[in-house]
Amino acid sequence: MTHRILIVEDEPSIAELIAINLTHAGFEVEKVMQTDLALAIMKDRLPSLLILDWMLPGKSGVQFAKELRSQERTRGLPILMLTAKSEEVDKVLGLDSGADDYVTKPFSPKELVARVKALLRRQSPIEDTGPLSIGPIKLDPSSHRVLAIWPDIDPKPIPLGPTEYRLLQFFMANPERVHSRASLLDNVWGNEVYIEERTVDVHIKRLRAALAPVDCDRYIETVRGSGYRITKTPTES
């Protein structure tokens, strides 16, 4: 299956550079210059991945990413943010808005293609683990669904973005073990991808935020100086 990439970029030369390199890499590519045109395209068919510029006319990429993450249909759409903003605070803001990865301009076309491929690989399960369960959290890789099942309460779905899903799946397949940021990058992101360790913290924060409404965020523990783990016996809050 050929993956379809939607580029939302208002600088035609940059959009064309990205499109040429992705096409040479075997992807099907569409380009638009603003978010309303992107929405019109996605209304009929979602792309495999969205490359989204930060500074756009009418609505910023950050605003658009937040809107996509708030909708059930587009919550799991992989988003790569592309921008000239290179400060750490900007990267964190971009990731907090819902982006799964962040590339700064000027960029290497080869690196961009590598990051696109890595994001698409993350759409596949880490391994064939079968159904997983930690406390009330139930994860079924075959249906890609995560539920919170508490006694005497109807099951509640836990909506997760693609990276948060893979993080949770990895944690649940390896319970009680402490995983360093470097280990999580290797196992969840892939060790051939250019990702900063700070990115892990942002996605852990997003995972906890998704688990909080069903009182499951406390199952993800921070082990100071070492990393993170999922536990079967969280400390009562």
Image (spheres, helix red, strand yellow):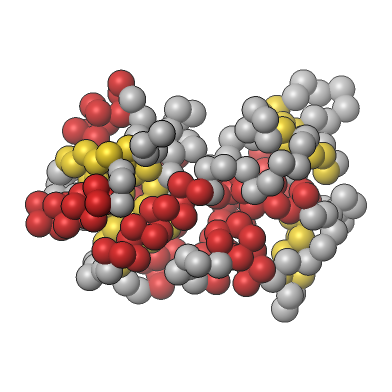
Residue 93 in view here: no
60 with respect to 225 (left or right): left
In which quarter of the view is residue 224 placed?
bottom right
**Where residue 24 appears, x then y in whole percent?**
25, 51
**Residue sitting at the far left:** 12
In which quarter of the view is residue 146 placed?
top right
171 with respect to 122 (left or right): right
- What residue is drawn where x is 64% and y is 60%? 187
**Where residue 20 appears, x then y in whole percent?**
19, 52
Position of 235 relative to 195 (above/below): above
131 with respect to 141 (left or right): right
Position of 161 relative to 205 (above/below): above
**Where residue 172 appears, x then y in whole percent?**
77, 48
- What residue is drawn where x is 35% and y is 74%? 87
- What residue is drawn where x is 50% and y is 49%? 121
- Quadrant where the N terminus is found in the figure: top left
- What residue is drawn where x is 23% and y is 27%? 40
Q: How many numbered tags mark residues here?
A: 0
**Where residue 177 appears, x then y in whole percent?**
82, 63
Residue 80 in view here: yes
Depth order, front residue of 80/95:
80
**Residue sitting at the far bottom:** 225
